[in-house]
Amino acid sequence: MTPPAPSLPGAEHHFVDVDGLRMHVAQAGAGEPLVMLHGWPQHWYEFRHLIPALSAGYRVICPDLRGFGRSQAPPSGYEKAQLVRDVLGLLDALDVGRFRLVGHDWGTILGFMLCLEAPDRVRAYLALGGAHLWPALDLRATWAFRRFWYQLAIATPGLGPRLVSDPRFVRLLYRVWAARHDAWTDADLEALTAQFAEPARARAPRTGP
């Protein structure tokens, strides 16, 4: 089952076979390629407010990572190195050479790894709301780890898939993370959480970056 794509004027949707993995990608605009990697529990649609403006000067490329959105959700292959290979394979299939890169949340880790894996292809990288690969050791920052409680919950065998497949749990996370109470409309939340109704997609995040 492939969830329906949310509507965004100007965005075109394509499916690309990458070494046997069917990946979905949303694209808009023309010009220099700009690749945007989503985090958890999102997919390409998290960039819906940025795509219209950015597509005025760039070819914006927003893939759904393995197991998310409308990309295929196989039972394995969620190691970080494999996700990086997925993205590079997709870009090869789209005939994208050098590109600018944005990563958010889990996508920041993949973004850093992409810079290391293919430094000749990444022109510039912007990391948003994610951990650095080499964080400074500061005991004063340990209190910040409380923010990652949900990762322990979704990684727990048995419990994790049940939580992720419950739209109330995922919607709660969005509400907790939001900078404003009106940051997410009901339509936004439905577009981003409906994917986890499929059991394979509810299991996929447990083995993500």
Image (cartoon, helix red, strand yellow):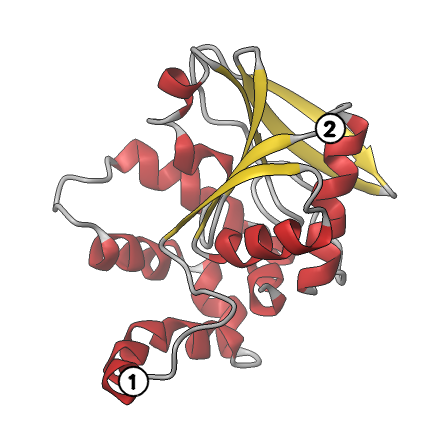
> In the figure, is residue 194 to the left or right of 200?
left
Q: Tally the numbered discs.
A: 2
Residue at 61 percent of width and 20 percent of height: 13
Q: Is residue 33 above or below residue 157?
A: above
Task: Give the secondary structure at mark 1.
Answer: helix
Q: Is residue 91 left or right of residue 113?
A: right
- Which residue is label 1 attached to? 142
User: Whole-percent x and y of residue 11?
Assistant: 51, 16
The x, y position of residue 105, in whole percent, is 43, 55
Mark 1 surroundings within 10 Å by alpha-carbon count, few (fewer than 14), some (14 through 19), many (20 or more): few
- Which residue occupies 27% across, 76% down? 144
Residue appearing at x 69%, y 52% in the figure: 84
Q: Disc 2 marks which residue? A: 97
Give whichever of discs 1 and 2 has the lower sequence position: 2
- On the picture, is 131 further left or further right than 171? right
Q: How far apart are marks 1 and 2 (CA)?
A: 40 Å
Q: Looking at the picture, which amino acid does disc 1 mark?
A: Thr
Residue at 57%, 36% (x, y): give it: 3
Q: Quadrant of residue 110?
A: bottom right
Q: Residues within 10 Å of mark 2 (few under 14, many from 20)?
A: few
Amino acid type at mark 2? Gly
Secondary structure beneath dot 2 equals loop
Identify which residue, 126 or 119, lies in the foreground: 119
